[in-house]
Image (cartoon, helix red, strand yellow):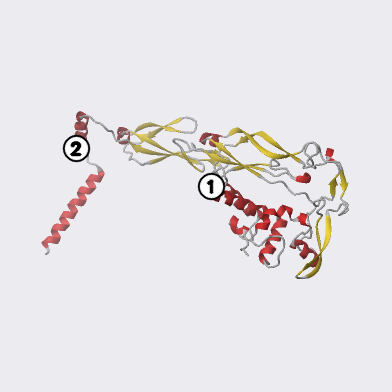
């Protein structure tokens, strides 16, 4: 039998992780392995599927309790499967009439695991992840984007219930409208009475008598959804926006999932970003480096005039405060690195003048080397004289 898949390891969290920690880990991995970032990569697609599978279980408190018990008692059997694959079909778990180990322990220990809690509640719809491309400047300054995608939208004619007019229901005859049935189950603990979701009505307690003609009783319709979203200034590749209720619709009038919008930021030709700070490299002339002078530095909105002091070496970095990215957490700085351009193709006359100039200037480095050379010769002479 294959080893059971550990969803905590898949998300890289501990078994005691909070829901916020699970959600954070899921968001990070979902963006890392999203198919939009790895087109045609089957391994990344499989990893993305595995991450979503793990999140579907661990983000649901009831499913997580059942899964934790199965991890601790792998030989008790049940509906989970030997390698964790049974979890991929978890949404159909209640349809089998077997509510899982939660119900067994609820009947034995007086509901310590919550019994058949929330079994009659319609399942929530799946979330949708979208990736939106933004230019470097749009991400920094903020913009408005039209989002278009296809999803299962709740049917307006039946309010997502699947019944004509949203009212053509009848009480389920099998469960009497409770949404639950009792089943006698033989386990290693003995014979128990298990309470599970009614398979006839899916735990809702009611059955559709007349299906909605618009959606055929499904409760949702496949449509193209369009809306405009205001993207705030300062978003980056780690940012995401959530639009509640714009994910996949759920059957039986359940709550729809959410839409998560991630961003892929296109690089700029000159500027580079790190959090709130911007970085740029600007070439300066040999004369400006020696004598100092004013240079133009590309910024977010326009060119910035900056004074370079005399004697500036290539590779020197200057900071222009408050000219970085504006975010809700403050404004960053613009860091300017200068590179001295060495003139090429000088004429003989220019080379002669440069040589004459060079002969009149004693550079600090040359002076230090001269002193070192003289000191080294003196030491060598004294050492030789002692032999």
Residue situated in front as seen by the camera: 222 or 228: 222
Residue at figure coordinates x 68%, y 56% from the top left: 87
The quadrant where residue 290 appears: top left
Residue lying at 68% horizontally and 63% vertically, measured from the top left:
70
Instruction: Give the left or right position of residue 300, taking residue 118 as reference.
Output: left
Q: The C terminus is located in which quarter?
A: bottom left
In this rendered view, identify the residue nearer to me: 1 or 256. 1
Is 95 above or below relative to 339? below
Work out which quarter of the rendered image holds the N terminus and state it: bottom right
Residue 15 placement (x, y as % from top left) = 63, 61
State which tag comes first along the sequence, 1 or 2.
1
Decide: few, some or many residues near mark 1? Use Cα within 10 Å; few <14, some 14-19, many ≥20.
Answer: few
Residue with the mark numbered 1 = 41
Which residue is pictured at 52% across the width and 34% down the height?
137
Query: Visible in this render: residue 59?
Result: no
Circle 2: element type: helix
Label 1 – label 2 distance at C-alpha = 62 Å
Q: Going by the image, does 283 lie left or right of 225?
A: left
Q: Give x and y (percent) for residue 311.
A: 31, 38
Give the label on residue 359, or none.
2
Q: Is residue 302 left or right of residue 117?
A: left
**Closer to us: 363 or 274:** 274
Picture coordinates of residue 190, whole percent (x, y): 79, 70
């Amino acid at each position: 039998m294959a080893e059971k898949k550990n969803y905590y390891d898949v998300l890289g969290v501990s078994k005691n992780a909070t829901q916020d920690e699970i959600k954070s880990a899921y968001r990070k991995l979902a963006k890392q392995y999203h198919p939009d970032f790895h087109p045609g990569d089957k391994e990344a697609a499989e990893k993305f599927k595995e991450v979503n599978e793990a999140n579907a279980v661990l983000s649901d408190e009831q499913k997580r309790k059942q899964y934790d018990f199965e991890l601790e008692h792998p030989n008790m059997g049940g509906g989970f499967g030997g390698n964790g694959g049974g979890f991929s079909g978890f949404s159909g778990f209640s349809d089998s009439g077997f509510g899982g180990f939660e119900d067994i322990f609820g009947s034995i220990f007086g509901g310590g695991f919550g019994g058949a809690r929330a079994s009659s509640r319609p399942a929530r719809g799946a979330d949708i992840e979208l990736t939106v491309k933004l230019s470097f400047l749009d991400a920094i300054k903020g913009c408005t984007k039209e989002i278009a995608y296809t999803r299962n939208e709740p049917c307006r004619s039946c309010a997502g219930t699947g019944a004509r007019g949203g009212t053509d229901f009848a009480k389920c005859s099998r469960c009497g409208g409770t949404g639950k049935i009792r089943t006698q189950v033989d386990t290693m603990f003995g014979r128990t009475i298990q309470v599970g979701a009614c398979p006839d009505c899916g735990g809702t307690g009611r059955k559709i008598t007349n299906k909605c003609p618009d959606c055929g009783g499904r409760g949702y319709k496949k449509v193209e959804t369009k809306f405009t979203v205001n993207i705030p200034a300062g978003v980056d590749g780690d940012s995401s926006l959530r639009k509640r209720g714009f994910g996949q619709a759920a059957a039986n009038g359940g709550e729809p999932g959410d839409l998560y919008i991630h961003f892929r930021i296109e690089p700029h030709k000159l500027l580079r970003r790190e959090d709130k700070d911007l970085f740029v490299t600007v070439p300066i002339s040999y004369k400006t480096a020696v004598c100092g002078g004013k240079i133009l530095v590309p910024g977010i909105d326009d060119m910035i005039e900056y004074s370079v002091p005399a004697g500036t070496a290539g590779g020197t970095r200057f900071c222009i405060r408050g000219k970085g990215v504006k975010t809700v957490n403050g404004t960053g700085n613009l860091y300017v690195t200068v590179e001295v351009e060495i003139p090429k193709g000088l004429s003989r006359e220019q080379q002669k003048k440069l040589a004459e100039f060079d002969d009149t200037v004693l550079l600090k480095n040359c002076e230090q080397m001269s002193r070192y050379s003289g000191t080294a010769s003196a030491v060598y002479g004294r050492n030789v004289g002692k032999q």
